Image (spheres, grey):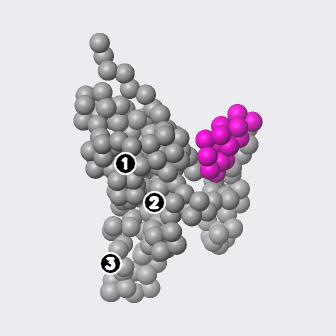
Amino acid sequence: MAKKVAVTGMGIISCIGNDIATFRDNLFNGVCGIDYITEFPTDNLPVTIGGKIKDFNPENYGMDKPFIRKQDPFTIFGMAAAWQAMNDSGLKSADNIDPFRLGTYVGSGIGGFQTIQRELDKFKDDPSGQWISPNFIPTMISDIAGGQIAIKHGAKGSCIDIVTACATATHSLGEAYRAIKHGYA
């Protein structure tokens, strides 16, 4: 008999809701999360609208201010979604499961884009590169979210970052499914 696998926890941070219930309701009711960009000047940009995360406080998801200051929003959003998924699953932490069977499979198109932009701006101002942060690479790489999630929740199993364009979410679920089905998790 084939081993059955189930997704037991979900989480989301999006422009139409920062939890599964709100996201689902807004999605089914046709709520639009696209709005004008006001966080930075858009005068010289061809696009002045985007999907923005609203009403979001990372401290509500188990993160403290020193941690938040050091991370790109990309990582913060991933941490918040994982916190929701852990709570939704009933696990909450690795205390309730063998930590070597708990892993992270994070799907991403790109890592810390705000970090990339900030450091690029520094480089444009001073091409010597001496002001580039030593934390630039560890803060912007796309697998940092999965790593931080694993550390926070005590996961010692696989920590995999999947970047496959539009297929990323499905690919991440599929890889996690295979790891569980074949006994790697």
Disc nearest the viewer among 1 and 3: 1
Q: Quadrant of the N terminus?
A: top left
Which residue shows up at 71% across the image and 46% down it? 32
Residue 173 sits in quarter: top left
Looking at the rendered structure, the secondary structure element under dot 3 is loop
Residue type, numbered disc 2: Thr
Q: Which residue is mark 1?
A: 94
Residues 138 and 86: in front is 86
Residue 129 sits in quarter: bottom left
Which residue shows up at 53% across the image and 41% down it? 88
Which residue shows up at 32% across the image and 20% down it? 3
Residues 82 and 162: in front is 82
Q: Which residue is mark 2?
A: 75
Label 3: few (<14), some (14–19) or many (≥20) C-alpha neighbours in 10 Å: few
> How far, Cα to Cα, is label 2 from label 3?
18 Å
50 lies left or right of 112: right
What span is colored magenta in the figure? 15-29
Q: Quadrant of the C terminus?
A: top left
Residues 82 and 77: in front is 82
Residue type, numbered disc 3: Pro
Disc nearest the viewer among 2 and 3: 2
* Residue 134, disc: 3
Which residue shows up at 71% across the image and 60% down it? 36
Residue type, numbered disc 1: Ala
